[in-house]
Image (cartoon, rainbow, N blue to C red):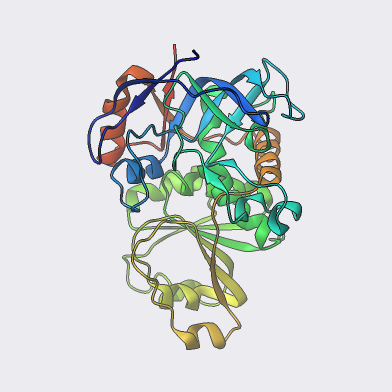
Amino acid sequence: MNIYNAYAARSAKTELEPFSFDPGPLGSEEVEIEVSHCGICHSDLSMLDNDWGMSRYPFVPGHEVTGTISALGEQAKGLEIGQRVGLGWFSHSCLFCHQCLSGDHNLCPTVQSTIVGRHGGFADRVRAQWTWVRQIPDGLDLAKAGPLLCGGVTVFAPFLIHNVPSTARVGVIGIGGLGHLALQFANKWGCEVHAFTTSDSKEAEAHKLGAHYAHNTKQDGALKKIAGSLDLIISTINANLDVSGLLETLAPKGCLHNVGAVLDPLQVPAFGLIGGQKSVSGSPTGSPTAIDAMLEFSARHSIAPITETFPMSNVNEAMEHLRAGKAHYRIVLTNG
């Protein structure tokens, strides 16, 4: 019997408790990761509370895993025992559909999330298909890399999706867990970077993170001052957007790209799109190759999340810290 020790919630909106389970035999394509660190994403909180209606209990959160490989299935490819690796939002895809064969494994119709119907990384060990277990470059710290596996690739993917040139003007809405990484990526990509915030207190930090300009959207006329200038806006927030006003800031053929999990429908005016041939789009976290590119880019340019750490045993304290909006900017749990 191979027992994993984890922290699980027995029902929605309850505290996490010690939880042990037998994962069964290791699948032929599976990799077992000994978890050294696991970031906490707001999606963990949403899944804990069953905000999206797809949580199953007992629920073990955690999908920003870093650690080392402790076991390999016989069909697991390109990996070695003891290798430094990471695991993000997705854990399994079919490998034979059009999307997988095109390199878009994250768009596979049967793709499985690490914490939807599976036990996640708030544990001593976790399993995933080899495809989604990615090597961590030597230039990245395992204690910092976890949030890159979900939040990082989520805001990095739009640069790949839209073939963003280094001459582009890019806006980032929200200077938080996702936004503070998006600002760093946009700056190192070579773009002119605009940060959108509702707090004057965050403007100085936005500049430190790579923004060339910061705009307080609560101030009258803030959006009109940059009308028609931005090529891409990445929205990282889970609150309602002034889509009409944001579309006016876009240059012709510009795009408002949403990665924030907003539950309410976006109100998109047709004429706001038609006039400048503009668009509104969105994306989940990235493919395995996008994750690799993001990790290599981060290592080359010394990009890392700003993190706070808690022992895994203090997981409930850490979750409440996130729920209260006090995280600056990502939380990482440490094992051992």
How many numbered dots are placed on residues in this image?
A: 0
The spot of residue 252 in percent (x, y) is: 62, 79
Determine whether, in the image, residue 234 is placed left or right of residue 82: left
Of residue 24 and residue 320, the one placed in the foreground of this image is: 24
Residue at the limit of the structure toward the left, as seen here: 14
Above or below 251: residue 332:
above
Q: Residue at x 41, y 38 (%)?
A: 329
Residue at 62% in and 28% down: 27
Vertical comparison of 224 with 322: above or below: below
The reply to whether residue 29 is in sight is yes
In the rendered image, residue 188, in percent from the top left (x then y), is placed at 65, 46
Q: Nearer the viewer, residue 263 or 21?
A: 21
Left or right position of 298 against 225: right
Residue 210 visible in the displayed image: no
Q: Quadrant of residue 28?
A: top right
Image position, residue 199 (x, y; %) = 32, 54
Give the quadrant of the C terminus: top left
Q: Residue at x 68, y 24 (%)?
A: 73
Image coordinates of residue 49 in percent, x first then y, are 28, 44
Q: Quadrant of residue 318?
A: top left
Residue 51 shown left or right of residue 148 in the figure: left
For the point 70% across and 37% down, the residue is 296
